[in-house]
Amino acid sequence: MITQITCKGLEKSYKGDGTKTIALKSTDLTFQKGEITAIIGPSGSGKSTLLSLLGTLDTPSKGQITYDGEEILSKRKSLIADFRFQEIGFIFQQFHLLPTLTALENVMTPLFSRKVPYNKLHRAKEVLEQVGLGDKDDSLPSQLSGGQQQRVAIARAIVHKPSWLLADEPTGNLDTETGERIYDLLKELNAKENCGIVFVTHDSALAAKADRIITMKDGAVISDLMGSTP
């Protein structure tokens, strides 16, 4: 289980049509397992880029990310994929549920091609119960509310009990009340599973509930503060 993620001199740039776009400027950050960190800032500030790098979905142009001191991104793609499966769960704004699969089947999708030391069906049912949807096993996404769909997406993210949950605008498509319920669920998972949570949000009130608030602008971290709400 990875307990610390460290970024040193992290940069990400993109080249196209003769221009170079810098999405993330030289960034030094450390994240601790068990902590809830909110990343806020305007669109284009580098929030989602940083999250993708932390989650090994992308590689930096410069700098390094280490996980408990180990550099993962230089390894073979298959080993990076194995690491990602073992250690990191992703939650997205758009849910990304497969419309023809039931809630239970959607939760099981990360396990389909994996050998695991537990019963896949039992684990999927267990995490659906954990997010309060034990009675929605056979429901299709179209039969669920937005908040329920996001709960299924969270269950899918935690089905292998990762060390870290990375969430990109997890409440962005939800009304305020439902969004607060989703945040409360993440906080509950953090307390029970001791997973590190890093979430990107535009909601400053939601961000204030986190243990730590990182503010970004124009690809750079401009502040890194403790949350104001216990």
Image (cartoon, rainbow, N blue to C red):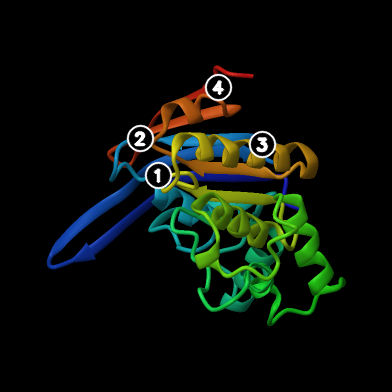
Spatial CA distance of label 2 from label 4 is: 15 Å
Q: CA distance from mark 1 to mark 3?
A: 20 Å
Between label 2 and label 3, give the one nearer the viewer: 3
Task: Tell me which numbered mark, 4 or 1, is placed earlier along the sequence.
Answer: 1
Disc 2 marks a residue whose amino acid type is: Gly
Q: Residue furthest bottom?
A: 113
Dot 2 or dot 3: first in sequence order is: 2
Q: Nearer the viewer, residue 116 or 23?
A: 116
Q: Which residue position is annotated with label 1?
A: 47
* Residue closest to the eye, 63 or 219: 219
Query: Residue 224: in sight, yes or no?
Result: yes
- Residue 197 point in image, percent of width and height: 62, 42
Left or right of 202, for residue 141: right
Which residue is the site of mark 3? Answer: 187
Residue type at mark 3: give it: Lys
Contact (Cβ within 8 Å) of mark 2 with mark 1: yes
Q: Secondary structure at mark 1?
A: helix
Mark 2 and mark 1 lie on one chain; the one further toward the N terminus is 2
